[in-house]
Image (tube, coloured by chain):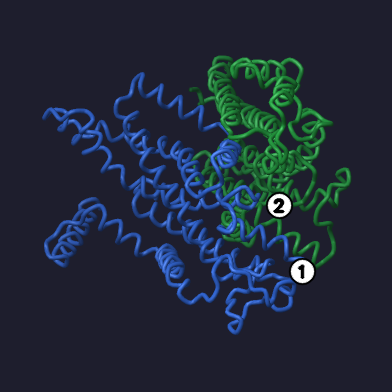
Chain colours: A green, B blue
């Protein structure tokens, strides 16, 4: 197990480094700089500004200091556009919002998707099965950025039940639509995966044995079939996690939650390179960590996996 | 039982050979036969062809360009900008008074083109990379695949957005950027298939007759990978279209006045509160139909070409 984790880390850490170097490099090859405005600044002033932001040092030294500050002090440096706050402030402000509904979406995706898939498999060709299969196909072509406007159209503009944006400190009615928009695709995909793997397990020999012994149906399903059938779903949790992180960008923007994704897009449009870099590095690190956690979880549950 | 099946199979084979004029059935004609039996897949291909034809023929009927503003309805788009034959705005007008019919056609073209070209880049790079890594194996293979592992786990969406900001939000950057990351998955699939192919007799025969290794890869391995590559590419196209629309939806994709389906959906989503539902309805309908068709066609192709998966 330990060697597995170490081997997996041997991929995760280079991934993170490549991500940081790549995004850092891209930023610095960008034409122009954030201080070039309408007015032309004298060269002297420009030099002072560069010194203030540490842009006058060699590139590798900037990179080294950048990584060092993040690792030791969780300091992502100053924002290039917002003079009164640092990138760390922006992250501290935006991240809890995204994290809140991201977590709920993750819980909803697994908490609804798995039971739905199990029921669909156990009661094959029942209405529950048709719902699971139907939603599964629909979710493939209705991504979150299409679902979000449709939800707002129905629940905000037509029914006036829920607010169509804002955050309001995470009151439940503000959180609900973002969660539904983010989670639906994954509810459907998890249900689909769960259904097919459950069907496969239910047709295996040892399940037939369990039934032949006269075990009650629910016990066969919950005690014997569920655990092996869960494996493909668990391996899919990694992509779910990544999808939630990228999807949160759309949800943040569309619902104006003030979450981290909204900062990402705004800083992309404002060319606030330091914020952009900080958010990219943070979300990238989360993605890598999430994938790592899922892989370790998978190896822990399924002893056959050793690579 | 076994002999009976064999006899029946033999008879069927004889009949079919007779009917098709004595020609053997190749993998591809077999696959075509299987594909044609899948009604959903065939219908999807027909729909896709119709949409492509529409994007080329449609502009001849349009009375407005993608950028021309219809001043007569500006500011009254909600009341007078709806779909109508009389004004020439068959799909209505957008918030700025531009013709949605032309814009949807252009958006569809760009979304499709990004998808197809991105997948094409992925096919070329991914196939060569995967085939070489798989065929030569050993250290080269582990080094090449480790590289893929590392890049595969990077959240490329953010890198792609960075590239668009830095190299300009143009069509070329968009499809190059997407192609450059989407070949990773392809290379894994291809490598896996190559590993099973390289121990087959025809490769052994090629080695025995002294064919050079690279020639084996190009002449013997790659042609046999075509089936799986085609399937994977067809399923890759809708994913790329989704990715491109995602970026356009955020307003970071292709630049105005050019547009894509994602950008049109995003614009439409902002104005639906004024009741201008055609602005989101038409691009959304095209988007959903295109994605549905690609998924069904891809599924059909997989069933037809990948006998293991049935």
**Residue A33: x and y, percent?**
65, 33
| In the image, residue B83 above or below residue A280 | below
Relative placement, left or right, of B25 versus A307 is: left
Q: Is residue A228 visible?
A: no
Relative placement, left or right, of B14 versus A214 is: left
Q: Quadrant of residue A131?
A: bottom right
Residue at the bottom extreme, as displayed: B86
The label on residue A259 is none
Nearer to us of marks 1 and 2 is 1
The label on residue A181 is 2
Give me the chain letter of mark 2: A
Helix, strand or loop status at disc 2: helix
At a point 69% along the width and 67% down the height, the residue shown is B95
Q: Nearer the viewer, residue B207 or A221?
A: B207
Q: Residues within 10 Å of mark 1 (few under 14, many from 20)?
A: few
Q: Residues within 10 Å of mark 2 (few under 14, many from 20)?
A: many
Q: Nearer the viewer, residue B265 or A180?
A: B265
At a point 73% along the width and 66% down the height, the residue shown is B272
Helix, strand or loop status at disc 1: helix
- Report if the CB atoms under discs 1 and 2 are less than 8 Å apart: no
**Residue B298: x and y, percent?**
43, 54
Q: Is residue B38 visible?
A: yes
In the picture of the structure, the residue carrying the numbered disc 1 is B274
**Residue A67: x and y, percent?**
66, 19
**Residue A100: x and y, percent?**
79, 39
Q: Nearer the viewer, residue B112 or A122?
A: B112
Give me the chain letter of mark 1: B
């Amino acid at each position: 197990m330990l060697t597995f984790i170490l081997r997996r880390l041997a991929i995760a850490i280079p991934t993170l480094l490549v991500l940081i170097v790549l995004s850092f490099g891209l930023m610095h090859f960008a034409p122009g700089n954030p201080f070039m405005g309408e007015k032309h600044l004298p060269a002297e002033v420009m030099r002072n500004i560069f010194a203030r932001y540490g842009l006058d040092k060699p590139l590798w030294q900037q990179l080294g200091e950048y990584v060092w500050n993040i690792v030791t002090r969780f300091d992502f440096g100053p924002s290039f556009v917002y003079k009164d706050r640092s990138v760390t402030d922006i992250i501290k402000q935006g991240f809890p919002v995204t994290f809140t509904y991201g977590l709920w979406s993750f819980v909803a995706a697994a908490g609804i998707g798995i039971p739905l898939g199990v029921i669909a498999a156990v009661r094959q060709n029942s209405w529950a099965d048709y719902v699971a299969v139907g939603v599964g196909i629909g979710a493939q072509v209705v991504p979150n950025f299409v679902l979000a406007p449709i939800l707002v159209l129905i629940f905000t503009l037509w029914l006036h039940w829920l607010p169509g944006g804002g955050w309001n400190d995470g009151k439940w009615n503000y959180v609900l639509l973002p969660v539904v928009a983010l989670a639906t695709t994954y509810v459907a995909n998890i249900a689909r995966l769960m259904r097919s793997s459950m069907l496969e397990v239910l047709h295996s020999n040892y399940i037939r044995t369990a039934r032949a012994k006269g075990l009650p149906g629910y016990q066969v399903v919950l005690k014997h079939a569920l655990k092996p059938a869960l494996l493909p779903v668990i391996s899919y949790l990694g992509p779910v996690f990544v999808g939630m992180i990228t999807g949160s960008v759309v949800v943040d923007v569309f619902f104006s939650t003030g979450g981290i994704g909204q900062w990402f897009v705004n800083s992309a449009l404002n060319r606030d390179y330091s914020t952009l870099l900080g958010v990219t590095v943070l979300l990238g690190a989360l993605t890598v960590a999430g994938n790592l956690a899922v892989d370790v979880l998978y190896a822990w549950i399924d002893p056959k996996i050793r690579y | 039982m076994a002999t009976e099946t064999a006899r029946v199979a033999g008879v069927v084979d004889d009949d079919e050979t007779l009917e098709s004029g004595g020609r053997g059935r190749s993998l591809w004609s077999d696959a075509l036969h299987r594909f044609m039996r899948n009604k959903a897949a065939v219908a999807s291909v027909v729909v896709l062809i119709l949409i492509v034809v529409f994007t080329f023929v449609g502009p001849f009927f349009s009375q407005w360009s993608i950028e021309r503003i219809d001043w007569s309805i500006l500011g009254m788009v909600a009341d007078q900008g709806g779909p109508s034959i009389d004004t020439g705005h068959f799909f209505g007008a957008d918030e700025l008074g531009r013709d949605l019919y032309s814009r949807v056609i252009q958006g569809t073209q760009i979304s499709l083109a990004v998808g197809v070209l991105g997948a094409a880049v992925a096919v070329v790079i991914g196939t060569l990379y995967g085939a070489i890594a798989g065929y030569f194996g050993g250290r080269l293979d582990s080094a090449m695949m480790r590289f893929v592992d590392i890049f595969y786990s990077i959240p490329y969406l953010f890198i792609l957005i960075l590239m668009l900001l830095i190299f300009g939000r143009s069509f070329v950057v968009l499809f190059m950027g997407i192609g450059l990351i989407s070949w990773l998955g392809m290379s894994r699939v291809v490598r896996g298939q190559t590993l099973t192919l390289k121990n087959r007799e025809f490769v052994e025969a090629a080695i025995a007759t002294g064919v050079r290794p690279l020639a084996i890869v190009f002449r013997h391995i790659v042609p046999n990978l075509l089936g799986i590559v085609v399937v994977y590419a067809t399923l890759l196209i809708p994913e790329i279209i989704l990715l491109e629309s995602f970026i356009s939806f955020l307003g970071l994709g292709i630049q105005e006045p050019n547009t894509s389906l994602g950008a049109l959906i995003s614009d439409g989503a902002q104005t639906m509160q004024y009741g201008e539902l055609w602005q989101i309805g038409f691009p959304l309908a095209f988007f959903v139909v295109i994605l549905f068709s690609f998924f069904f066609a891809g599924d059909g192709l997989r069933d037809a070409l990948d006998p293991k998966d049935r």
